[in-house]
């Protein structure tokens, strides 16, 4: 138990950035916060996401991002009630405190439930999957198979993407197809899964990463997801939806927070060539576009017909018309781009050893 506690513990003076790195390393969404080695509180990925959205300096200590109201259990609490609360609030682990507010024990989700922690809410929104590309990064295999049908563990990439949305409550999938479209249609018709309601939009020529969405004009009446066909995210989708609606966004971009360390001292100089600043191994934080989006149906009206038009073109067009484009951050470990061989191998390893929650 001591080792388990150490793996999920972090000091209250640790920076938000270092805490995010720790979550990436341990593949955790919740950490115990300690002060002088003693229990102090909890910090969740949700707390960090809210701090990033609010543009809080990531060098600040996590104590500035923590919530004052957190859920804990007491030693005298009925064990069944503790388990019920963990299920109700989808808690990764529950600290159990004694009468002196000291940590007496921790109950971990995987010690109680066999299945992975479900999302807080299920929201049934249509999902458009852009599955028409040639998959050039994964040649020569994609010369034979369309990329969406490449196996990933015991399922195809496409099934894993759809399953991640099914987990969030979505069942209606619209596949934008072009390259080897008949192969994709045939495979899914043979699969005949009751979890998937599948429609298609057919490109006759490549239209870019958003061009084929104009084929949905008049068909979309609700908020809908758009996903590339090589992206997996491990995130409660209802939280992205709530963010999207709270800020009245026309488009919300799901972004992975990636931190890079330059392994050298960096120098900045003035116009006269004199040193102005020296930083030893500085950290940089970037929000990386994952290729997963939440859109309002009126965004489709901005897409021209029968021309190559990318999702970045749509985002810029909406922004120029003063439409709201939000960015929802997720930790780097929660994003997998399986469209390249290197990342495909990493994700295959995660699935093999059970460290990936996507079913």
Image (cartoon, rainbow, N blue to C red):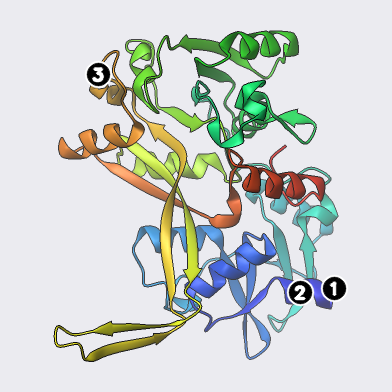
Q: Quadrant of residue 276?
A: bottom left
Q: Is any atom of residue 67 visible in this view?
A: no
Element on which disc 3 rests: loop
Give the number of the disc on residue 75. Answer: none
Give the residue at mark 3.
304
Mark pair 2, 3: CA separation: 55 Å
| Percent coordinates x, y for residue 129 in the rendering | 51, 25
Give the residue at mark 2.
5
Give the residue at mark 1.
1
Q: Vertically, is 346 above or below 291?
A: below
Q: Residue at x 79, y 63 (%)?
A: 107
Element on which disc 2 rests: helix
| Percent coordinates x, y for residue 170 in the rendering | 57, 26
Q: Vertically, is 174 above or below 43?
A: above
Residue 132 versus residue 191: which sits nearer the camera?
132
- Judge left or right: residue 60 versus residue 354: left
């Amino acid at each position: 138990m001591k080792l388990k506690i150490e793996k999920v513990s972090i000091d209250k003076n640790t920076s938000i950035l270092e805490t995010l790195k720790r979550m990436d390393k341990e593949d955790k969404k919740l950490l115990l916060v300690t002060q002088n080695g003693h229990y102090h509180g909890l910090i969740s990925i949700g707390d960090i996401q809210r701090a990033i959205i609010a543009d809080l300096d990531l060098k600040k200590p996590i104590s500035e991002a923590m919530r004052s109201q957190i859920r804990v259990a007491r030693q005298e609490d009925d064990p069944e009630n503790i388990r019920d609360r963990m299920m109700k609030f989808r808690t990764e682990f529950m600290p159990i405190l004694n009468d002196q507010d000291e940590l007496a024990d921790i109950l971990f989700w995987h010690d109680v439930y066999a299945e992975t922690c479900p999302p807080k809410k299920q929201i049934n929104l249509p999902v458009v999957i852009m599955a028409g590309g040639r998959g050039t990064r994964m040649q020569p295999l994609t010369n034979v198979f369309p990329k969406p049908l490449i196996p990933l563990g015991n399922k195809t990439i496409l099934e894993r993407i759809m399953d991640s949305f099914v987990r969030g409550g979505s069942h209606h999938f619209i596949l934008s197809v072009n390259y080897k479209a008949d192969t994709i249609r045939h495979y899914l018709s043979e699969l005949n899964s009751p979890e998937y309601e599948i429609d298609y939009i057919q490109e006759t020529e490549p239209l870019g990463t958003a061009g084929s969405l104009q084929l949905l004009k008049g068909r979309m009446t609700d908020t809908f997801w758009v996903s590339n066909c090589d992206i997996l995210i491990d995130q409660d989708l209802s939280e992205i939806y709530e963010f999207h609606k709270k800020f009245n966004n026309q488009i919300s971009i799901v972004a992975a927070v990636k931190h890079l360390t330059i392994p050298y001292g960096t120098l900045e100089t003035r116009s006269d060539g004199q040193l102005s600043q020296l930083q030893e191994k500085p950290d940089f934080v970037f929000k990386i576009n994952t290729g997963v989006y939440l859109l309002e149906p009126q965004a489709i009206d901005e897409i021209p017909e029968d021309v190559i038009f990318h999702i970045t073109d749509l985002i810029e067009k909406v922004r120029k018309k003063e439409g709201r484009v939000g960015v929802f951050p997720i930790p780097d470990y929660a994003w997998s781009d399986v469209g390249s061989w290197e990342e495909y191998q990493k994700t295959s390893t995660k699935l093999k050893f059970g460290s990936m929650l996507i079913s």
